[in-house]
Amino acid sequence: MADSISTRVARIIAGNVHSLIDALENANPEAGMAQAIREVDNVIDEVAAGLGRAAASKHLALSNLAEQNRRHEQLAGEIDIAVREGRDDLAKAAIARQLDIEAQIPVLEQAIANAASEEKEMEGYLTALRAKKREMEETLRQFISARAAQNVSTGGIGGAKKSAPDKMTQAESAFDRILARQTGLPGLMPATDAESAAKLRELSDLARNNRVEERLAALKAKGSGPADRS
């Protein structure tokens, strides 16, 4: 099941941007995008169930390991008593049981490690899927907003009709920046309006200046070390 989930998660994380873009070409793009979001929800449910099973398995293995260790210590005390009483037969039986426990402990420890690894993997899947769902929901909201703005600008139903390529162009420009920002993939259109471009340049300059100041402060702190000690 883990391989199946990992494959589906990878497909959603890596490919759903293209799925959303393809949905814009459908007769009902909102329904297409909503269906893609529901698919993510389904996988989230499966991963959450897998996480629950992994956590339960780890808890069970931990409990079993603790019980085996407790029993091993108890047997050690009983062996001492048997030896003092000259009951070698009882001591041998207890030692044999200890050997059985010692053989089981590495298996339990490996089971705990496997369950913990699966638990961590499932938690990572959940984080990635929930982030992808938020991105997709934001994309859908942006698309709906862009289409509503288009209806207003064209006078609603009575306005001039746009061709399919024109509609695609307007829809793409509405959420192009979101796709590029959230996924790291290039946007659908290369153009950026002047105001947004200016803000992005200002933000980039601000971030760069902050890095310069941080590095300068670090160098000053490093250089002042010997002087302070003298």
Image (tube, rainbow, N blue to C red):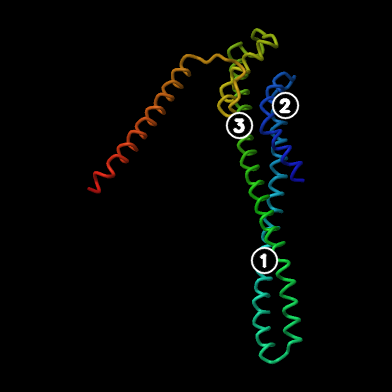
Secondary structure type for disc 1: helix
Q: How crowded is mark 3: few (under 14 residues within 10 Å), some or many (20 or more)?
A: some
**Is residue 77 placed above or below 187 in the rendered structure?**
below
| In the image: residue 103, left or right of residue 223 | right
Q: Residue 135 carries which label?
A: 3
How far apart are labels 2 and 3 at the CA level? 15 Å
- Asked if one can make out residue 34 in the rendered structure from this viewpoint, the answer is yes
How far apart are labels 2 and 1 at the CA level? 47 Å
Give the number of the mark in front: 3 or 1. Answer: 1
Give the number of the mark in front: 2 or 1. Answer: 1
State if disc 1 and disc 3 touch (CB < 8 Å): no
Which residue is label 2 attached to? 32
How far apart are labels 3 and 1 at the CA level? 40 Å
Secondary structure type for disc 3: helix
Q: What residue type is labelled 2?
A: Gly
| Front residue (pair 139, 7) | 7
**Is residue 152 placed above or below 10 in the rendered structure?**
above
Q: Which of marks 2 and 3 is nearer the N terminus?
A: 2
Q: What residue type is labelled 3?
A: Glu
Q: Which of marks 2 and 1 is nearer the N terminus?
A: 2
Which residue is label 1 attached to? 63
Q: Please, which residue is most extreme toward the bottom here? A: 85
Q: Which amino acid does label 1 sit on?
A: Ser
Quadrant in the rendering for residue 65: bottom right
Give the residue displayed 58% in from the left and 24% down from the top: 180
| Front residue (pair 8, 19) | 8
